[in-house]
Amino acid sequence: MVSKEQALQLFVEYLQIEKNSSHYTIENYQRDIEEFFMFMNEQGISFTSVEYFDVRLFLTGLYNRNLSKRSVARKTSCLRSFYKFLMREEIVTENPFGLVSLPKKDQMLPRFMYEEEINLLFSAISLDDTAGSRDLALLELLYATGIRVSECCNIQLQDLDFSLGTVLVHGKGKKDRYVPMGDFCVDALTSYIKNARAELVASKGKEHRYVFLNLRGEPLTPRGVRYILNELVKRAAVEGDLHPHMLRHSFATHLLNNGADLRAVQELLGHSNISSTQIYTHVTKEQLRKVYNASHPRA
């Protein structure tokens, strides 16, 4: 008889090996499943004997906590995948989440930064030290390519092609794509790798192929990237926190606002479906004003 802890471990291994899921995704799945395990303990039921009624009771509890539709949908999808895996492994015979419909998510436009705010971030970087050189290269790459923070942290030296001005990005589900880098990004990366990164490697004695390092000479983590960006926000006096994904949103929004083709942006972002990219077709008030002033005869 497989225990629920063993079942979860098998599922995690499946996500790591077969699905090639990111560390961030796996952490979220584990947290959601462990939350459901706590609910089962409270109800005194086994994970192999969960029924549709139990699932409805669990979901009711989520709504009573005033969780958003997006959060409930994510947890439901996670647990549906978990039980689908358990069925495949013949640990359970039915998927109790199979008949549950996902709640329609609230349509939320992605948060992005205006071009003026991006420029303030760049101006807040001091190039007088190793950290400044790294931070400039990091910000340039994130904004120039729109890559995910996990993809950025996994980039290695051999993935950069300075002659062509491209970076090989290892995306979700083992899907690789080449993304162009602008001249500013190429210059910042070249300077960082030849100088600041070389100094870090030499002083800390931790040679490896990852591009972005922390000040201990170890590969930079997504948490480290978030810290760096939020420190830049404080120095630039930009309002609010800056999540790395906001740079990805800004990349897509600015491209589309300046006339980029939606399909091209889809390829650059690494989206499997065009529907994931269409959320960026919103435009800023400034863009609407520019279009109006340029197009209306009485503007």
Image (cartoon, rainbow, N blue to C red):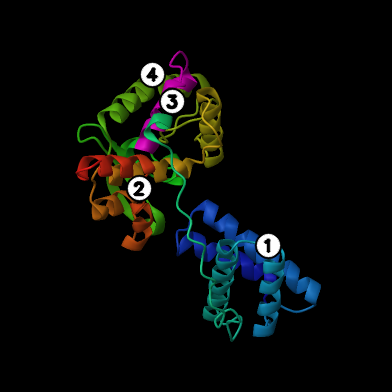
How far apart in space, not on screen, are marks 4 and 1 (Cα)?
A: 51 Å
Which residue is tagged 3? 120
Sort mark 1 into few (<14), some (14-19) or many (20+) by Cα contacts within 10 Å. few
Q: Secondary structure at mark 3?
A: helix
The amino acid on which the numbered mark 2 sits, given as a three-letter code, is Val
The amino acid on which the numbered mark 4 sits, given as a three-letter code, is Asn
Where residue 123 sits, quadrant-wise, is top left
Which residue is tagged 4? 195
Residue 142 in the magenta stretch? The answer is yes
- Specify which label sits upstream in the sequence, 1 or 3: 1
Q: Main secondary structure of the magenta part?
A: helix
- Specify which label sits upstream in the sequence, 3 or 2: 3
Question: Looking at the image, is mark 1 or mark 2 nearer the viewer?
Answer: 2
Residue, x 53% and y 72% (percent of image)? 81
How far apart in space, not on screen, are marks 1 and 2 (Cα)?
A: 31 Å
- Specify which label sits upstream in the sequence, 1 or 2: 1
- Specify which label sits upstream in the sequence, 2 or 4: 4
The amino acid on which the numbered mark 1 sits, given as a three-letter code, is Asn
Sort mark 2 into few (<14), some (14-19) or many (20+) by Cα contacts within 10 Å. few
Stretch of the chain drawn in magenta: 119-143
Q: Secondary structure at mark 2?
A: loop
How far apart in space, not on screen, are marks 1 and 3 (Cα)?
A: 37 Å
How far apart in space, not on screen, are marks 4 and 3 (Cα)?
A: 25 Å
Q: Which label belongs to residue 283?
A: 2
